Image (cartoon, rainbow, N blue to C red):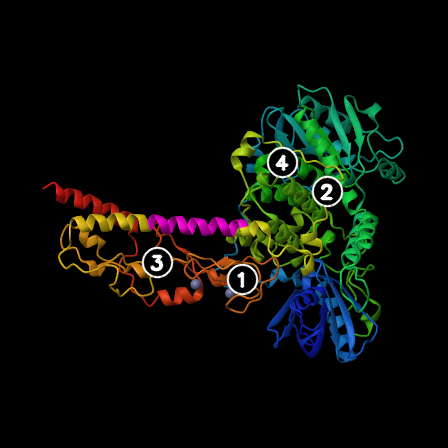
Amino acid sequence: MERIRTPKIENVRVLDRFYHWQNRNAMESTTPSTGTLYLTPTHLIFVNPVEKRETWVLLGHIGSVDRLSMAVGGSPLQIRCKTFLSLILVIPKDRDSQELYAALLRLAQPATYEELYCFSYNPPEESFDRTSGWNIFDLQSEYQRIGVPNQHWVLSKMNQHYEVCDTYPQFLYVPSSATPKILLGSAGFRSRGRLPVLSYLYPKTNAAICRCSQPLSGFSARCEEDEEMLNCILRSTPESKTVFIIDTRPRINAMANRATGKGYETEANYVGMKVQFFSIENIHVMRSGLQKLVEVCDLKTGSEDLSLPSHSTFLSGLQATGWLKHIRSILDASLFIAEKITEGHSVLVHCSDGWDRTAQTCSLACLFLDPYYRTLHGFMALIEKEWLAFGHKFSDRAGHLRPVFGNGGVSPAITPSSAVNMVIDTSREQSPVFAQFLDCVWQLLCQKPYAFQFNERFLLVLHDHLYSCQFGTFIGNNEKERRDLKLSERTYSLWGYMKRHLNEYLNPLYDPERCRLTPLLFPDISAQQLRLWVTLYSRFEEGVHPREPLLDTVTSLIDHSSALEDHALYLERRIALLKEMLANPPHHRRNPLVTVTANGAGMSSPHGSLSSISMGSSMNWDDYPNASVIIKSVALDWKPIRYVRYCVCSTPFSQFTVKYHCWKCGDVVCRRCTDTHAPLIGLYSNKPVPVCQLCYERSRVSPIKEKNATFAEKSDKLQKSQKTEKVP
Ligand SMILES: [Zn+2]
Ligand SMILES: [Zn+2]
């Protein structure tokens, strides 16, 4: 990491919509927030000490930096993030502003992989280790899960050293009747050697989803092996007489490609094949669609007034972006694939190179067909297979690196003076292809919430880490490149990180039984059903979201009621125990309801004398935890998550941070503050539950006499011993 010339700038004013709304809601003045700006090698941090407000911007998330014309009080920089955060920083000195601008351009898009955040990222100790997540997926076992290899589909090792296709995985599954001559011949006739290979096999009909790139057909070229290759796919689906070739591009685009020696299959040359075109636009159209969408979401009524735009301005703006039309075209093609598969026909899907639209549609079709891919683990496996293994160009599409210009192969150094006319490069290769896939999944999640084990937050976290460069998972453009970079040895895996926080991504409405009974999930793609994913694209507009995410409230209610049920069970058992004891009085009798025991904090239950009772000797009321202590040990009321802006540790909550409850005091706290789990005396299960730091610290004062035995075990023992006592 390089040295930064302007690490700290005082008296910076920040303008953002989120801030505006917070103030408006609080009926405070709408003067901009003033504070100190820090630039670290990985983050831009704005600290307002008066409001205790911190804004952290990961440099990898910065999508554009623009110098606006001089304003009162300084020189403004507008920062727009790939996560849709947009803010304006007003820097008092123009020189500082220029230096910051150049530094941000340099750091947000470094020239080499080695400079990316993932190579220096070190998670706090004890959180997770470097190997975690790198070995939980293995392509071969995923194929085994769908019953491959079998008599029709076999493993080919001809790409073991990426010699046939350097953007494909090492191991390819191909029709058993395809000879090496056919495979090599077909690879030679397909753009970048991306020959037709198996992506998914639907067990009910034995129909296969195969994927490839466009043929190098030009206006009239033919390839015997390629034609034979498609015939092999047909032979591997014995019950069907047709293979559908799904060209996801608009027909006119496919025709235009003929002029460059590429193109599409001529039906007359391919026996038993039917070519079907779809209308998914190319990466350039999608990129400009997103840029327009960002502008629409950023619309204001006026330059001074940050209020939201009028209804008609917003709707006509949204219409002009074509965004929902693009989402619909992707879902439409995917739906066609899934329908043909359930009808028993194999399909061969391609676009131009077969790594953007092909990845979108093949993975969505898999999601429609197979409920496994709608679980947390299955969804990660789907991304591993269709996106990472089959060579979606994550780094190019996300713009991780500054593109290299000229023949020298070195990006020019950026200095404050040279930076004047530079921008973060968003041209050519960048495109929200993976983000569109997540958007499509979100549409399904809204339509059929019961069918997904994961929630919206899971998709948002995936989206943000596509750009963060914090983990090695989405770095590089294909499997070979990731191996050459030794990412699994040198960086941490996003899956390892997510595994640590799975409970945050669980959908409380998931119904696995219903998925088992109705495994197919075919979405409604009518215009009325497709919506703008406001939570993603307008994430930092506080005024347009519900007060708290509905599903978080549901999850909190489920947790709360399970805490109360556990507590009620404890109380019932204790009442039963007291009745037993009254029937068989212990030696030194005292009123259990007024005695104060040593276990004042009411946590980490000693369950004192239960074991001595179980031994059948002296029973002593003194050894019992006091009733009021028990009742206080579990919070009956939980503080509502709405309106809570700060954790007790003064970490601010944003709209989308998960809010946890301390099971002991019922307060709302952040994730870091409930890292500690402890058993509570008033819970029957004796399982460790989330408690806040304060409650945890207090609990450590009290002695833990018997850590291991649970209350249930002890009261069971007691009942047994009393029974044996009764029968001398
Ligand atoms: Zn607490
Ligand atoms: Zn906290």
The verdict on label 3 being within 8 Å of ligand 1 is no
Q: Earlier in the sequence, mark 1 or mark 4?
A: 1
Which residues make up the magenta segment?
554-570
Decide if residue 696 is on the left or right side of residue 448. left
Query: Which mark is in front, 1 or 4?
Result: 1
Q: Residue 622: x percent and y percent?
A: 21, 61
Tell me the residue that label 4 is attached to: 157
Say which amino acid is labelled 3: Ile
Q: Nearer the viewer, residue 618 or 241?
A: 618
- Pick whichever, 231 or 37, lies toward us: 37
Labels 4 and 2: the sequence-earlier one = 4
Q: Could you tell me how far apart the alpha carbons at marks 2 and 1 are, in whole angstroms? A: 39 Å
Q: Quadrant of the N terminus?
A: bottom right
Identity of the residue drawn at 56% across and 49% down: 505
Determine contact: label 2, label 3, CB under 8 Å.
no
Q: Is residue 623 above or below residue 252?
A: below
Q: Nearer the viewer, mark 3 or mark 1?
A: 3
The residue tagged 1 is 123
Q: Which residue is mark 3?
A: 631
Q: CA distance from mark 4 to mark 2?
A: 42 Å
Provide the secondary structure element on which disc 4 rests. Answer: loop
Query: What predominant SS class does the magenta segment belong to?
Result: helix
Looking at the image, tell me whether mark 3 or mark 1 is earlier in sequence order.
Answer: 1
Please name the residue that numbered disc 2 is placed on. Answer: 530
Please tell me how crowded label 3 is: few (under 14), some (14-19), or many (20+) other residues with Cα within 10 Å: some
